[in-house]
Image (cartoon, rainbow, N blue to C red):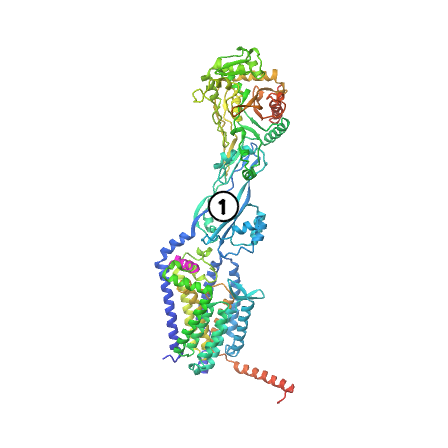
Amino acid sequence: MAAKAKTKPMHIDSLLLVTVAALLSFGLLMLYSATLYVNVSFWHQQLRWVFLGLLAMAAAAYFPYTLLQKLAVPIIFGTIVLLIVVLLFGNTILGAQRSFEVLGVSVQPGVLARLATVIYIAAWLASKGEQLHQVRYGLLPFAVILGVLCALVALQPDLSIALLLAATGLLMFFFAGGDPIQIFLSLLIGGGVFGMLAWQLTHARERLINYVAALKDPSQLSYHAQRSVMAIAEGGIFGLGIGSGRLKTGYLPVPHTDSIFAVIGEETGLIGLLLVLGLFALFAYRGYRIALETSDPFGALLAFGVTTMIVLAALLNILVMTGLVPFTGTALPFFSYGGSEMLVTLTGVGLLVGVSRGRPKGDWNAILDRSWRNWRARLSRDVRRAGLPGH
Amino acid sequence: MLRDPESRLRLIALLLIALLLLIVGQLVRLQLFEHPRYVVEAKQMLERQYSLPAAPMGKVLDRNGALLVGNLPVFEVDAYLERDDETATVIPELAVVLNRPELELQAALTFQESYTGTHLWAPLARDVTSDTVKQVRAMDLPWVTITPTWKRYYAEGALASHVLGFVNVEGYGYGVQAYQWRLLYTPPELSAGVISGQNKPLPEEVARRSNTPAPGVTLRLTLDRTIQAYIEGELDKALLEYKAEAGTIIVMNPQTGEILAMVSRPAYEPTRYADYALTNQVGLFVDPAISKTYEPGSVFKLIPAAAALDSGLVDTNWTYEDTGVLEYGGVVVRNSDRSAHGVQNLEGLLARSLNVGAATLTTRVLGAERFYKFVTAFGFGQLTHIELANEAQGLVHMPEDWDWQDGFLATNSFGQGIAVTPLQMATAVAAIANDGVMMRPHIVAERISPDGNSVKIEQTPLGQPISAEAAQTLTELMARGIETRMKQATVPGYRIAGKSGTAQIPVSGGYDPNHVIASFVGFGPLPDPQVLILVKLDRPAIDPQLRWGSQTAAPLFQRIAARLFVLLHIPPAE
C-alpha cells in the first residue's frame, strides 16, 4: 500500500483536469447563450462561482483527504443541522424549501448534503471492511444513516436529490463490497418507500402520472419535458448555432438551470450533445480509474463516491431532458447555473484530484491523533485541576 | 466473483454504459429521425404573425406650415399572463399607477373558470404617458407588455375641429383626416416571424427587417391658422350677439378654390371625441359647412340672374312689372315685404331681393329646362369633392323627378324648396367672382411624403357655368345693390359684391313660423376679388324685425371682410 503510493508521487491527473476544464468552458459558453433571454447577470454570477469553485477545488486537491475520514462525523452532523435549519427557516422557492440566505447568498444544504454524505459514507464504509457482509453491521446501520439523510432532503421536498443520494450511497455500498443480494432487497424496500413518499407529494405524483400517460402518448409529456424534447429534436445533427436557440426565449422553462442540456441540444445539435456525453464519460472513466488505482480504501471510496455523485446527477438531468424519465428538476453539473451546485461539484473534483495525488506524505493521521490526544490530555488535566471526585 | 473492486466497478460501468446507450439512442431518434417533424412543430409554435411598432401618422399643417395635428408618443400597457403568474400582490400598486379601479383590474387579470387556455391577454391601459410607463417598468412585472404607439395631438385644441376631424380606432371619422386617412396612417405592418415566449418578436427578427413602417404623409392645408382663429372668434361673438343657435363661416379664394378658413358652431374638441361619443353627442361631429343642407333663400337669386344673363335673355336694361304677387304651378309667390315694387330692372330685383322678380326670371324668362341646366352647372345637388369626409350633395328637384311639382320652378328661384350645403353656395358664388369659372373648393394644399418629396395639389376648375361677361355684369349688379341699399356690408376703400338671404327653415308640413337662417355671401375687392366670405347664422333669436340677413349676417360679413383685407395684405383702392 505504501509502496504503491510511492511509485506515483505527487501525480496530478492531467486528463481529469483537462476534462473538467473542457466541461467548465463549454458550460460557461452555453450558459451565456442560455441566459441571453433570462438575464445575463446570472452568467456574471456564475463566473464568480466558477472562480470560487476553482479555489475550493485547489484547496480540496491540496487538503490531505485522509483528514476527512476523521472529520466525517462533524461534517455530517453539521449537514444534518443545516438540513433541519432549512426545513424550519428556509425560503420557499417554487413551492420547496431548499435554500436559506447567509450574507445575501442563498445556500442550498440539499446540494451540500450530497458531498457530505459521500464523505461520510466513504469514511463509514472504509472503517467497516469485511463486516459489511453482515446485515447487522453492514446493511442495517447503513440503511439507517442513508435513510435519515435521504428523508431530510426529501422533506424539503427535493425528491430528486434524495434519489441521487440514495443511488450514490447504494453504489458506494456495493463498490465497498456490500452483498448484492442485500442491496437488491433494500432496493425493493427503498423503492417502495420512495414510491409511497412520492405519492404523498402532489407535484411528484403529478409528474409520475404525466410520465405514465406520456409513455403512451408523447404529446402528454409534461410541458417542460415537451419543450426540452422539442428543443433537442429541433437541433438536428449540427444544431442552430450557438446563440441562435429559439426555445430559450421564453418557451423552454429555466433554460439557464435545469434545461441547459436542451439549449445545448438545440444550438449545437447531436454533435454538441455527444461531446457533452463524451466529456462526462471521460470524467467517469478518470474518476473510476482513480478509485481503482488508490490503495487506500477511504480514498478509493471517496473517489468512487464523488465520481458517482457527479455522473449520476448528470445522467438524471439528461434522462429527464430527453424525456426518458419523468420530469424532475435537477441541475447538470458543470453546466447549470447555481452557486452551491458549482461549489460542491468543483470541491468534489478537488477531492478526486487529491486522491489521485496519492496518500499525503506527512503523517497527518499522526498529527491529528497527537492533537486529539493533547486535547484529551488537556481536558483531563483541567478535569483533574477541578478536583473531580474519583481522581 | 464480485470480490474485488475492479469487477464490481466493471458491473457499475456496464450499468452506466447501458444508460449512456439509452440516451444516445434517444438523441439519435430525436435529432436524426424525428428532427423534421419537430422542426415543423417548433415553427408552428414559434412563428406567428406580429405587428411591427406603429409608425407615426402624418401631420396636418396650416398653409404656412404651422402644426395643427401632430402625434404624441404614448404607450399601450397590456398583460400577458400565465396561469401561475403572481398578480394579487401587485394589483393595488398597479391600480394606482394606471389609474384604474382595483376591482376592475382584478377582474381583468383573473382566469375565468370557463377559460382553458394557458395564457391570458388583457389590455390594461391605453394612451399611457412615458412617466407612467416608467413607474410600470419599475414594478418589473414579467407579464406586463408595453407597446409604444402614437396618439393624435391637436396643437390648437378645438381650432378648425370640423375641418381637421378625427379618426377612431376602427378607421372611421370626420374631416380631412378621415378623408385622407389612408395617406396619413400606415397600418402597422403585420409580419410573420419568430416570437419570444414573452410574445415579442425577437430582437434579431426585428433587426432583420430593415423596412420600418413608413410614417404617414404630412398634409399642408389651405387653411390659414390666423384667419381661422379670427373668424372663429367672430362667429362666437356673433352667435352671442344675435342669440343664434348655430352658424357657419367659410372664407375661400374664389380664384383658386382654396379654403382659407371654415368654421361652424357648435363644434367639439377632437382630442375628446370618445367622450362625445359616450354622451350621445355624435351630432357635433357632423360639419354643417359641408354635411348639412339648408334652404339658401335669397342668396340663391344670384343663380337665376346669372342664368338669365348668360343665356342673353336679359341684360341690364331688362325690366319687369312687379305686382307683388306671382302665381305659378299652384303656388303664390310674394315679396318678403308683402308689397309691389312696380317696374324693376335686374339691379332693383337683386338690391331689393324681390321674390316675385326671381320667380319671373325662372318661370317667364328661363323656363325649367334652362334654369335647372344652370342649377346643375353651378354644382347644386352634387358633391364638390372637397377633401373632407361625409360631404352632403344637397337636394335639387328636377322636372323629370317623380316628385316634381310645377311650383318648384317658382320657389326655387328664391332659394326655397332646394337644399344646398354652405360650401356649395360659396362655390357657386365664387364662380361669379372668378369670371364664371368655378374652381373646385379644396383644403389640402400639399402632400409631403416622409422622404421629403411633396406634391402640390392642382387647382382644378369644376367648370364654367356662365361666361365671363355675364359674371362681370352680375358682379357689378351685386356691388351696386349693396352700395345703394346695404351700406352695412361695405368696406371703405374696397368694392365688394354680395347678396344677403333670409331663409325659412323647412319643418315637416311646411316652414318654421318662428325661425330663419340669415346669411350673406360676398366677395371682394373688385375688380380682382381675392376672398369670398359666406356667413350663415341659424335661428337668430332676436327681434324678428332685426334678424334679416341684411341686418345680422351682412354686418358680420363686413367686419370679417374689413379685417381679412388687412390680414391678406390687400391694399385699399385709391
Q: Main secondary structure of the magenta part?
A: helix
Q: Amino acid at mark 1?
A: Pro
Task: Reply above or below: B385 against A78.
Answer: above
Q: Is residue B517 visible?
A: no
Q: Is residue A230 magenta?
A: yes
Which one is nearer the viewer's eye here, A377 or A9? Answer: A377
* Secondary structure of residue under mark 1: loop
Q: x, y percentage for residue A264? A: 43, 60
The outermost residue toward the right is A386
Specify start and end residues of the magenta stretch as a single range: A223-236
Mark 1 residue crowding within 10 angstroms, few (<14) / some (14–19) / many (20+): some
Task: Reply above or below: B39 against A161.
Answer: above
Q: Is residue B421 visible?
A: yes
Q: x, y percentage for residue B393? A: 48, 27
Q: Label 1: which residue?
A: B53
Q: x, y percentage for residue B315? A: 52, 12
